Amino acid sequence: MNVTSSPAITPPWLIQGGMGIAISNWRLARAVSSAGQLGVVSGTAIDSVFARRLQDHGVDDELRRVLDRFPVPAIVEDALHRFGDVRRRAGTPYKSLTMLTERSPRRAFDLVVLASFVEVALAKLGHGGLVGINLLTKVQIPTAASLCGAILAGVDYVMMGAGVPTHIPGVIDDLCHGRRTTLPFAVTGAASDHPASSLTFDPTTYLGDTSSLQRPQFVGIVSSHVLATALFKRSNGPVDGFVVERPSAGGHNAPPRGTYPLDEKGSPVYGPRDEIDFDVVAGLGVPFWIGGGVTSSADVTDALALGAAGVQVGTMFAYCQESGMEPGLRHRILEDLQHHSLTVSTSVTASSTGYPFKVVDESDTIGDPEVYAARTRKCDLGYLREAYLDENGATAYRCSAEPMTIYLRKGGHAEDAESTTCLCNGLMATCGLAQVRPDGYVEPAIVTSGDRIEDVTVMLEGRDDFSAQDVIDWLNPANAPDGVDSLVTPTSTAGAS
């Protein structure tokens, strides 16, 4: 297997955040990449996203072009037979996937590889721009298969956060060379040298006639200079850059360092220990981007003045036309922002990961206490489950969002589960793929955004909607006030061919 290094890349000044589930879909990533910046697809739950899209829409011409390029046609045929032959009728349940475990059959991982390949390949179709994929370190079991599919599709960047993925550079190297790879697997109750504490993945099944693969750049998403330094020094391969996210960013946040108080809304309070020393990050000698609270060209120039190559932006893109957010929900939030304020809370209990998670208080979503209380607890997607050793020493799984009696029976603690919600089902609903239960109940959405969500309204001045290109133009540091555009010569936002 020949491995080519990524061609010399001028770091883009703008990275579009990898928002899951499927908010950062291939359409959004393609729009941003076509404009000369780094478009990023979310790899979270990509197998379920792909299976549900097939049930709703089948295969169009663009998807067929991409599927015909996948190296193993039998895997494509199997997926289409299972999910694409018959359209789902509105108001009926989706055919769901069996939750992944370390013992899942190869067929389950085939679908992950194919789905990841499709998402990246669609994002890269029709232009020569850069495309990345974003994965969560906390979602462990599908990681290697997701990376394999993305690499087969020619992904340019791999972005990973929600943990310290020191093993991923080595995994990327193994996959690019067509080698069997091993990943650490966090199993509660198992020591690091326990047989249960590792996962293996063999990419050779998926290579077909592929003779050469390009190694993508690896960018770690961190919350501090301390974590950046640890990831850079301890990784088993090259770390090509960092996104340094501030606590104002949406989605999962790193908790404050040490013990910390909560404010009157129950949100964690960040203190001096959480301040980022950007000089330390710059001293690592690789590009870095600043994320969280970036909503204007002045914010971009501030980042550049701190030594950053640019910025990562999520919230502004989450509400643009190309976003994967369910259109009715997206328009409702935009209307609410124009007519009254929305608040964003940092919940320390919403996510089963234990990480703080930003939740928008939009009505008719899980952010509404009445909607949360009316939902029956259920875990049937399982991407954020905790692996643990049961009383027989076997690997088992539990989730603090599943029914309380079941969670407690598996050794969980009530205080860890009292206000937890199912992010998997909630976020699937947010991107328009809500499960419908047999009794007709439709899983409600959960919306996450950065703290400065109200800044999105600036994009609506004189219009009722906006595009990804509008966001790029608004953020372009060349348009910053007071002449500070001399700090940067931005990459062209003209369409690439």
Image: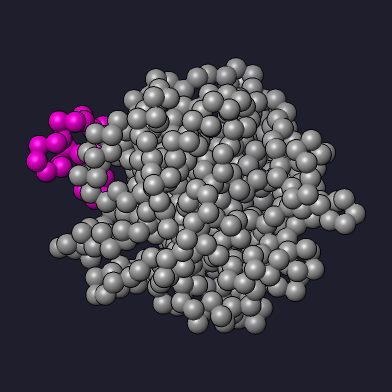
Q: Nearer the viewer, residue 100 or 91?
A: 100
Residue at point 78% right, 63% down?
A: 411
Residue 32 percent across, percent down from the top left:
34, 43
473 relative position to 68: left or right: left
Q: Could you tell me which quadrant the C terminus lies in? A: top left
In the image, the segment drawn in magenta is: 469-495
- Residue 406's image quarter? bottom right
3 relative position to 226: left or right: right
Residue 76 percent across, percent down from the top left:
65, 45
Residue at point 15% right, 35% down?
A: 485
Q: Is residue 135 above or below residue 219?
A: below
Residue 175 percent across, percent down from the top left:
64, 28
Magenta stretch: dominant secondary structure: helix
Evaluate whether residue 321 shows in this view.
no
Residue at point 57% right, 82% down?
A: 374
Is residue 194 covered in magenta?
no
Is residue 481 covered in magenta?
yes
328 relative position to 148: left or right: left
Q: Could you tell me which quadrant the N terminus lies in? A: top right
Evaluate whether residue 144 shows in this view.
yes
Residue at the far left: name it: 482
Residue at point 61% right, 60% down?
A: 352
Residue 219 percent across, percent down from the top left:
47, 34
What colour scheme governs how the chains and residues are painted in the rendered image of this protein?
A: one colour
User: How many discs mark residues in the rendered view?
Assistant: 0
189 relative position to 386: left or right: right
Q: Nearer the viewer, residue 55 or 287?
A: 287
Q: Nearer the viewer, residue 93 or 334?
A: 334
